[in-house]
Image (cartoon, helix red, strand yellow):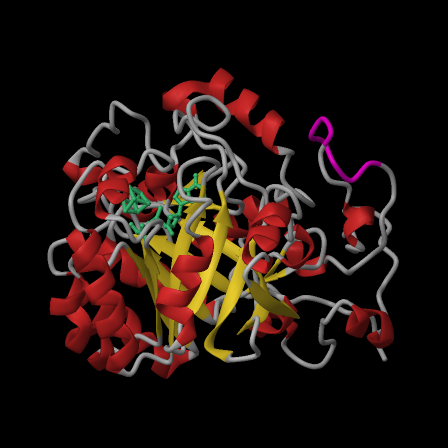
Amino acid sequence: MPPARRTAPFCSASCGGLADAVYGFPRGPTSDIPGGVDARSLSLPVMPSGAAIPMDAETAATYGLTLRGDARAHGLFDRFGRAHTYLRISVTERCNLRCRYCMPEEGVQLLPKDHLLSFEEIERLAALFVRLGVRKIRLTGGEPLVRRGIDDLVARIGALKAHGLERLMMTSNALLLREHIPALLRAGMDAVNLSLDTLRPERFRRVTGREGCEETIAAIHAAARAGFRKVKVNAVVMKGVNDDELVDLARAFARELPIEMRYIEYMPFEGNGWGEELEMFPAASIRGRLEEQLRLEARGLNDGGAGTAQMYDAFEKDGRPFQGQIGIISSMTEPFCGTCNRTRLTADGHFRWCLLDEGEIDLRAPLRAGATDGDLAGLIEQGLRSKRAGHAPAAVLKETQKAAGPTHARSMIRIGG
Ligand code: SAM
Ligand code: SF4
């Protein structure tokens, strides 16, 4: 069997030669973040630029990689052999809520109108990513449903299913969801992740700065009945804010309905009060809190091991099973960087390879200056080559974001969750 060779049909000469790279093993330091994750601790192979040791089929298989044929068709690879088959596209930085954990108290400056990618530009980039191996696209924001004409954009992206896209998904706060459900289903939307941190209207108002608890709950139920392949509910868990509602949330959505109830560790982003007025409630405590009243059976990471949520089947203590499942996303205390397959496109057209790294490459300016698909693919590959093995620990992230300030570090609402 010949060594694993990646072909990079769109890679321009300036992109640095991913086309000639072969897999290799770690040599020298594999993390440049103080206290950061080392690739070896994640069992990741490292792809050195120089004398790489070719990977044979057996080794490739242990990393879940294929040597057969067009490896390239299975995703964009980084230095550690991780295939990036998942793109999250933020379609707006605007939102109809003001969640404190997502944005600075004073809000964010509105993007100048011409900085926002047009539908045509999003469609072109999405199509390019699909040609490069992306198989799942999630539309997010800000709140994706506040973008005018969103149904049209969803239909355009849905049409990529005829060209290799396998899954189309959206993350939304669900406030405007009910009126869009028929159009989303027509466009081929497979799954929706709907965010709700509390079942209590007064608490909802405090966390999100707006009304809307009852409407969100109604929209989640409507989505569960509507025929999406999957409906998930996302709750960010904050100590002393909603950590007393974890079982209530699970019972409200996952007991009688096939909904996945997901609890997300609160992550630090620019200006979001992390570790100051708001505190993280770690995954181990989330599990503990649920197990005070429920029985959980571990099912491993979602998406066949490549996902971000540790999955559990849930049962009442008397043995009654839940229809849905429980997911716990432990980005801070038990990171899953070793299996990361995600990339991002911001609403203002910047490519990002890690949610928790400020690195990004502008695709909008070259796109508007007439760049070819090959030029854009070169930039995407260049960005991906700087992806680190893992993100920095929470305290380091917090300090880096603080030092960078709002001009250089993005809050979650400006990245796209
Ligand atoms: N507006 C939509 C929504 O709320 O679902 C989509 C965008 S929002 C940024 C995407 C997801 O990120 C939501 O589920 C939200 O709860 C989550 N999120 C926002 N800030 C977060 C933080 N600091 N830590 C963890 N999750 C966060
Ligand atoms: Fe808006 Fe979603 Fe951020 Fe809340 S989490 S402010 S709903 S973008």
Would residue 87 be found to the left or right of residue 195 on screen? Answer: right
Is 49 above or below relative to 9?
Answer: above
Residue 173: quarter of image: bottom left
Is 405 above or below relative to 60?
Answer: above
**Residue nearer the viewer, 92 or 22:** 92
Would residue 35 be found to the left or right of residue 8 on screen? Answer: right
Residue 66, given in percent of the width and then of the height, sits at: 71, 76
**Residue 319 covered by magenta stretch:** no
Residue 100, given in percent of the width and then of the height, sits at: 33, 33
Residue 345, given in percent of the width and then of the height, sits at: 39, 50
Q: Quadrant of ligand 2?
A: top left
User: Can residue 331 be spotted in the picture?
Assistant: yes
Residue at the far top: name it: 403
Residue 29, given in percent of the width and then of the height, sits at: 82, 36
Residue 30: quarter of image: top right
Residue at the far front: name it: 318
Would residue 176 be found to the left or right of residue 416 on screen? Answer: left
Q: Quadrant of the N terminus?
A: bottom right
Range drawn in magenta: 29-35
**Which residue sits at x=60%, y=46%?**
285
**Which residue sits at x=35%, y=45%?**
346
Is 69 above or below relative to 396?
Answer: below
**Residue nearer the viewer, 16 or 398:** 398
